[in-house]
Image (tube, rainbow, N blue to C red):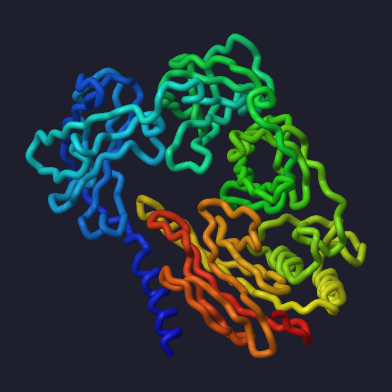
């Protein structure tokens, strides 16, 4: 009874923490705000064209939940102080200044929260005024701005770079996004060329992509092969980020020591010499690696490993995971892999259908007959809201894992579990551990309401798990886990 109560409480807590829908306000409910920005080091007026500071607001109760509403932005060209209109004005709201989630000034500067008016009320009586002190987060460095050339973008064939910028929050010390350069370059860049700048980067929009022009100068420093380590990698997982962005993929790589790295790539409208668009599990390729932490760029075309008929998810094993992956593909459900006839067309008729699924089930039965094992069935439910309260969609999908003995599961992005990670990422927390199994059930250790909990779960009964990666403004995941006993033997 206690476990059922805690389980229900955990689900209720997750539901209550979902961001509230956006409140609607009439257009006339606005006010003005005059902002004066100072250099935190010198105390003088701050003049850097292109720096953008966001204004957020909400009720105190919603702010306690971490929910902010976008209410405007301060953008400078030359004027300081600057007067800006604040939308969604409400006398009971609290407002906040932030350098922004996608605002490029935040890559270089931070707000001095002790001297600045960070949280403040606003009045309908004008003018409202606040002061901000900014300081540069990073010392002068040749790699304050690092541009790695990947290919050309769009009909104009603009040079397309992956821009790496310093971030104290990132595991490697850098975050990155792609942008095209519309300015003049001294030479024609080649794949893997590295450029730098010593100026703050504030891109503008060129169609659907971020762009830079002659407002800054970038200088070639060498190539990724010259400046960084080259490491052979194996693809161990491929995640399609979104159905709305089919060209964006997250590829999980492993080096020879079993250390893992994520590489996210977007090849939409991009002509690139080396593509990861058809990368699949088991592929091998060379990568440029930054300080042993950040995979920067693929240096060789992915070499497909020799396929094994029935190994649908390309993990080099034939087990229940292949059955689950093939079932998802046949039913058009979300899946981490793509259909490949070389492994899924088991009867050789040129199609993948229920007859191949039946053959795969028999093949898995034969492969596993002599091994003690159970199958974990993971049903993932997802949904959530964006920072502006918009519905990001919802759905569910099912994956399976064969368990032969003590097994640790780590929660990864996209509602997926990674089994027995050799070197789990800093963001990957252990969410479930199979201690052992026998005829009576499965002894488990799992996280419940932030605390480690033990139980023996009978076969066929459901265990509800909460995510270890809850976010107030994005997709969240909930998990239902069941086990089936597939072998007559047990494993201690």
Q: Give 360 or 291, whichever is nearer the viewer.
A: 291
Locate the N terminus by quadrant.
bottom left
The percent position of residue 314, horizontal first and vertical second, equals 77, 57
Q: In the rendered view, would you say 72 is above or below 236? A: above
Q: Dividing the picture into quarters, in which one does residue 420 lie?
A: bottom right
Residue 268, visible in the rendered structure: no
Please name the residue shown 42% across and 21% down the image: 140
Can residue 34 be seen here?
Answer: yes
In the image, what residue occupies the spot 38% across and 74% down?
Answer: 12
**Residue 139's spot in the image, x, y percent?**
40, 25
Residue located at (22% from left, 60% from top): 61
In the displayed image of the protein, which residue is found farthest to the left?
125
Image coordinates for residue 10, horizontal then vertical, percent = 41, 74
Location of residue 96 by image quarter: top left
Horizontal side of 337 relative to 99 (left or right) equals: right
Residue furthest to the top: 186
- 57 left or right, relative to 15: left
Q: Is residue 194 above or below residue 395?
A: above
Q: Residue at x 68, y 20 (%)?
A: 190
């Amino acid at each position: 009874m206690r476990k059922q109560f805690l389980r229900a409480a955990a689900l209720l807590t997750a539901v209550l923490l979902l961001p509230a829908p956006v409140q609607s306000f009439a257009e006339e409910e606005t006010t003005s705000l005059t902002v004066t920005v100072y250099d935190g080091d010198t105390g003088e007026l701050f003049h850097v064209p292109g720096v953008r500071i966001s204004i957020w607001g909400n009720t105190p109760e919603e702010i306690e939940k971490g929910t902010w509403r976008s209410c405007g932005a301060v953008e400078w060209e030359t004027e300081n102080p600057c007067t800006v209109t604040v939308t969604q004005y409400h006398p009971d709201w609290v407002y906040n200044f932030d350098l922004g989630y996608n605002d490029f000034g935040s890559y270089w500067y931070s707000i001095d929260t002790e001297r600045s008016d960070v949280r403040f009320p606003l009045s309908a009586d004008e003018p409202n005024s606040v002061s901000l002190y900014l300081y540069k987060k990073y010392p002068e460095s040749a790699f304050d701005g690092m541009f790695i050339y990947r290919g050309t973008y769009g009909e104009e064939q603009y040079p397309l770079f992956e821009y790496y910028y310093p971030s104290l929050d990132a595991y490697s010390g850098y975050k990155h996004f792609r942008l095209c350069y519309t300015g003049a370059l001294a030479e024609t860049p080649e794949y893997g060329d590295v450029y730098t700048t010593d100026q703050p980067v504030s891109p503008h929009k060129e169609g659907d992509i971020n762009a830079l022009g002659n407002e800054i100068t970038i200088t070639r420093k060498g190539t990724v092969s010259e400046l960084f380590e080259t490491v052979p990698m194996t693809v161990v997982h491929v995640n399609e980020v979104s159905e709305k962005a089919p060209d964006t993929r997250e590829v999980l790589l492993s080096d020879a020591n079993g250390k893992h790295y994520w590489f996210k790539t977007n090849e939409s409208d991009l002509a690139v010499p080396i593509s990861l668009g058809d990368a699949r599990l088991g592929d091998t390729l060379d990568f440029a690696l930054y300080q042993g932490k950040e995979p920067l760029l693929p240096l060789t075309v992915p070499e497909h490993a020799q396929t094994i008929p029935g190994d649908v998810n390309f993990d080099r094993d034939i087990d229940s995971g292949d059955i689950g992956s093939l079932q998802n593909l046949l039913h058009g459900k979300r899946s981490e892999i793509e259909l490949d006839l070389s492994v899924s067309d088991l009867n050789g008729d040129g199609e993948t259908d229920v007859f191949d699924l039946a053959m795969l089930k028999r093949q898995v039965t034969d492969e596993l007959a002599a091994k003690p094992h159970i199958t974990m069935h993971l049903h993932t439910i997802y949904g959530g809201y964006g920072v502006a309260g918009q519905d990001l969609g919802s759905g569910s999908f099912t994956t399976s894992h064969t368990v032969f003995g003590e097994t640790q599961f780590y929660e990864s992005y996209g509602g997926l579990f990674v089994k027995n990670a050799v070197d789990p990422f800093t963001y990957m927390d252990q969410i479930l551990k199979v201690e052992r199994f026998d005829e009576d059930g499965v002894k488990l250790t799992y996280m419940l309401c932030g605390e480690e909990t033990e139980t023996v779960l009978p076969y066929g009964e459901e265990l509800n798990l909460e995510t270890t990666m809850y976010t107030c403004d994005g997709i969240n995941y909930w998990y239902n886990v069941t086990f089936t006993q597939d072998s007559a033997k047990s494993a201690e």
